[in-house]
Amino acid sequence: MTCEVGLSRSVRAFHIMPGLPGPEGQLHDHDYRIEIVVDREQLDARGMVCDLDLLEAALTELTSRVTSRLYPAPGYPQRTQRLRAVRALGLRAGDSVIDMACGTGLNFPLLEEVIGPDGRIVGVDLTDAMLARAQDRIKANGWSNVSLVQADAAGFDFPAEVDAILSTYALTQVPECAEVIAHGAAALSAGGR
């Protein structure tokens, strides 16, 4: 007898195929489904096929790795949109910002330009490979006011009295998106955004 257990997650990817006529040459999207299935001939000593928490963590990591390769969409004005998001926060020199799902730290230069060396950035991401590249960016720019935290967005413990929280292009991939937003909002200082 074969025992089987699995989890899946849906991912929506956007892209443009420059130079192609019709819809392919315009920004459009595709839906993908990522599945992990474990099958065994026998149950383990606990009567399980596998540890579901480990399976969920593996799926989250796999989804993060796949989506990191899907973005940025060629031709999409990513830097312009990032700058627009940073400006919308209305940051001031000395503010503290959480960059949720910060990836390689592409928002950091835009944030640094506004908050300056007296401000503080906390970059949070699940993927160690992304954080390694973010750390390289921090070191290359000599920023001493940026710290990195490896954590799942849903489990991140937001520090109190944060002035702003930013997330670009990734939070929609988090199944617990609404919970993350609620926890973040509760951690904001008065007037935080």
Image (cartoon, rainbow, N blue to C red):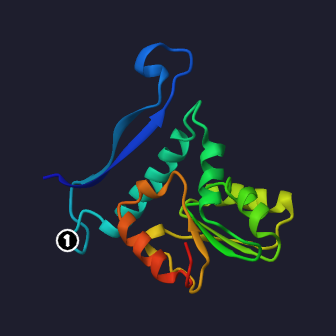
Using the image as rendered, state which of residue 70 and residue 127 is in the foreground.
Answer: 70
**Is 91 displayed left or right of 188 in the figure?**
right
Q: Residue at x 25, y 68 (%)?
A: 44
Residue 6 versus residue 186 in the image, above or below:
above
Counting other residues with Cα less than 10 Å from the Cα at mark 1, is it few (<14), some (14-19), or many (20 or more)? Answer: few
Residue 48 spot, x, y in % from top left: 22, 68
Q: Residue at x 60, y 47 (%)?
A: 81
Residue at which label 1 appears: 47
- Whether residue 51 appears in this view of the structure is no
**Is 184 displayed left or right of 165 in the figure?**
left
Q: Residue furthest left?
A: 1
Using the image as rendered, state which of residue 114 and residue 160 is in the foreground.
Answer: 114
Residue 40 versus residue 68 in the image, above or below:
below
Q: Residue furthest top?
A: 21
- Whether residue 153 appears in this view of the structure is yes
Using the image as rendered, state which of residue 162 and residue 149 is in the foreground.
Answer: 162
